[in-house]
Amino acid sequence: MNDALQRANDRTAVLVDTHDAGHTYGDGTRAVVAVHGVTCQVRRGDRIAVTGPSGSGKSTLLYMLAGLEAATTGSVEWPAFGATPAGRPTAAGLVFQGPSLIPTLDVTENVGLPLVLAGMTDAAARQAASRALGAVGIASLAWKLPGELSGGQAQRVAIARVLATEPALILADEPTGQLDHTTGGQVIDALLATAERIGAALVVSTHDPAVARRLDTEWHLIDGGLAAPATSTGAHR
Ligand code: ADP
Ligand code: MG
């Protein structure tokens, strides 16, 4: 484990620190201010729901926290990681809202791919993938191709792929959006249990008040801005 991740193991470590951060897509007459004026911190142990109507900036804020979209105004820093977590699957992992599996790889290979790319052997990556698939209740799908999966199954594979790398920061963009209530509950159970087991922070965007209630803190977005100052509770756990 490198120094940055060692520091991230501290329960009080600030993983993400934003100041007046915003993101605007495009420019000139086509500019869309997706997020603006967000000052927030994510600490190890935090369990945060990002809520708000469609188009309020939830996905964009998650991309910014993951380092996948830059702040076009203000700043986003990752004190515990030392640098952007983008491209470092053990630092931060984002479960995308839409389909993101590679169609020619089976489920186990999809889940293990980030680990193989990070230098793990195929055998070790398969073992980690199996464990993550079990955690989201789909061990039986290990040999399927993405084209053989339902939308809900594919979503759980994408979640397993993030859990397998055991990131210090887990971000999930509407992970229960395509799932029925029971399956959605199981997915939240798996995210919470994994975050607890590996000591990660968890940030979940959701439309569903029942999902938001499962987390400790709610950040509500209206038109790209936080409705109230962001608080974070994990440091006290
Ligand atoms: P949410 O996830 O809450 O639905 P998004 O972050 O996806 O919100 O979108 C916030 C705003 O930014 C919306 O007005 C959306 O249309 C716009 N937006 C999102 N992605 C892009 C993009 N790639 N290019 C231009 N506008 C975008
Ligand atoms: Mg979205």
Image: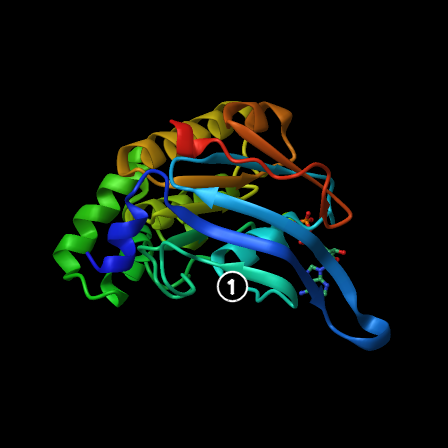
**Colour setup of the view:** rainbow
Q: In which quadrant of the rendered view does residue 105 lie? A: bottom left
Seen as rendered, the residue at the extreme right is 29
Q: Is residue 10 left or right of residue 215?
A: left
Q: Residues within 10 Å of mark 1 (few under 14, many from 20)?
A: some
Quadrant in which the N terminus appears: bottom left
Q: x, y (%) of residue 48?
A: 52, 36
Q: Is residue 62 visible?
A: yes
User: Which amino acid, mark 1?
Assistant: Leu
> What residue is at 83 percent from the left and 76 percent from the top?
28
Instruction: Locate residue 224, reporting x and y percent.
Output: 73, 50
Is residue 90 found left or right of 120 in the rendered image?
Answer: right
Label 1 CB, ligand 1: below 8 Å? no
Residue 180 visible? The answer is no
- Give the SS element for disc 1: loop
Indicate left or right for 199 with 220 as reference: left
Q: Identify the residue position indicated by label 1 in the image.
A: 68
Name the residue: 67% across, 59% down. Answer: 22
Q: Position of residue 123 (x, y in %)?
A: 13, 56
Figure quadrant of the C terminus: top left
Pick the residue in front: 222 or 111: 222
How many marks do you count on the picture? 1
Residue ID at (43%, 33%): 234
